[in-house]
Image: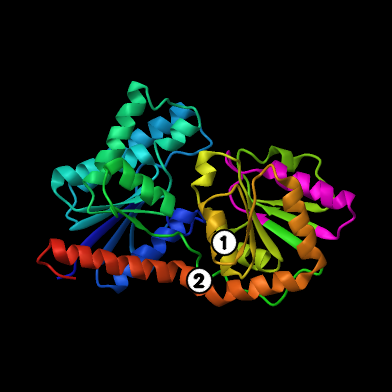
Amino acid sequence: MAVNIGIFCDAFRPENKAVAIRLYYLAEAFQKKGFNVVVQTSTRNASDSKLNVRHNIFNAPSNEGSNLARLLGEVLLGTEMFFRVLFSRYDLVLISSPPFVASCMGSWAAKIRGTPYIFDVRDEYPEVFISAGLISEKSMIGRMLLLIEKLAYRNALIVTTVTEGICKRIDEKLKTQNRAVLLRNGFDGDLFMPSAEKEKMFSIIFHGNIGKFQDPELILKIARKAHAENLAIQFNVIGWGNNDDMLKKEIPPNVRYLGKVDYNKIPALISKAHLGISFRSDDLISKNSFPVKIYEYIGVGLPVMVTPRSEAGDFVEKNQMGFQFDPDDMDGIFNKIQSLHADHSKLSVLAQHVVSIRSDFSRQSLSEKFVNHVVAQWNQLSPRKV
């Protein structure tokens, strides 16, 4: 008899959020391994001919809403998740966070029912709340949320997360070693492919959410300097968010802001560029993050430029995929772009190397490896083997 696994998430395909794609390929990998998979999601139009997808009553809270509205949304979704897990007949559940409060409520229900669960951490909460100044870690609410976070990790069969830095900090919080398992986001290997066709003008691409931790101002500063120096460089920006106002105003003539673009069209657009950029603000969250866009640049064979100096920047440098800079080192960033523009052979060597190792970072490959790890853990836990 197959093992029944329930996957609880805020978003699922066809949404173009990173979590939606990440969990789609996880669900597919579990099913290929012989699990009976049920996906429980807030995405209303989520469906798949191969997977059993069910829809939540309550929507996931929007990042664009007020703090009070977001909290209310999390509690409503969390209450629904709590009862769905508590009265389910799953042998194993996977709970994806954020939404943090809702996910913790789901893990609480799994603990009460005695159902083993995998806790998938995509962003560090409540640290995001603390970094944004919404709560103090020394306040009663802050201490309570930090305790809830530890309990969610401690009671899980497996804790998985997206960066080595978060893995390390989870281990530090729990005072353990190798408790957290790294599961990188990766890129969708069915969509993101290298292209021999490139734009005629040297082009630099940014794509993705343009939220609080992104740095569109740096893109505009570099573009203005390139325009002043009469460099034939085109800057293309794809995405939208609560930090995109300056891109909607007067921008340099060498910047093209495309706004929100359908996810399925993004691979073709970015594959024609020469260099991918991920410019983020200089803060702890950015230094510990690994933006999905970097994997997607890798997927189409683009060298990458990253700010700030971070785990993501260390990764691209170590793997000879690109460069990292401090956000305030505008001269260093501009000089590197100018150098690559002047000598395309340098960029070509980098791009060839990216293409040669890109397959290791597809979501399909990463998901398959992770599911094999889950099977090993499950087989140790239960006499009912997979």
Q: Residue at x 35, y 70 (%)?
A: 368
The range drawn in magenta is 206-233
Looking at numbered disc 1 in the image, what kind of residue is underneath it? Val
Q: Which residue is mark 1?
A: 316
| Residue 283 can be seen, yes or no | yes
> Residue 313: image x %, image y %?
57, 55
Is 247 left or right of 138, judged from the image as shown?
right
Location of the C terminus by quadrant is: bottom left
**SS for dot 1:** helix
Q: Residue at x 51, y 33 (%)?
A: 65
- In front: 191, or 327? 327
* Residue 215 included in the magenta stretch of the image: yes
* Quadrant in which residue 5 is drawn: bottom left
Looking at numbered disc 2 in the image, what kind of residue is underneath it? Gly
Q: Which residue is mark 2?
A: 189
Q: Residue at x 28, y 52 (%)?
A: 177
User: In the current view of this chain or complex, which residue is farthest to the left?
Assistant: 383
Cα separation, mark 2 vs mark 1, equals 19 Å
* Quadrant in which residue 276 is drawn: bottom right
Point out which mark residue 63 bears.
none
* Residue 239 included in the magenta stretch of the image: no
> Residue 136: image x %, image y %?
42, 25
- Whichever of labels 2 and 1 marks the residue nearer the N terminus, that label is 2
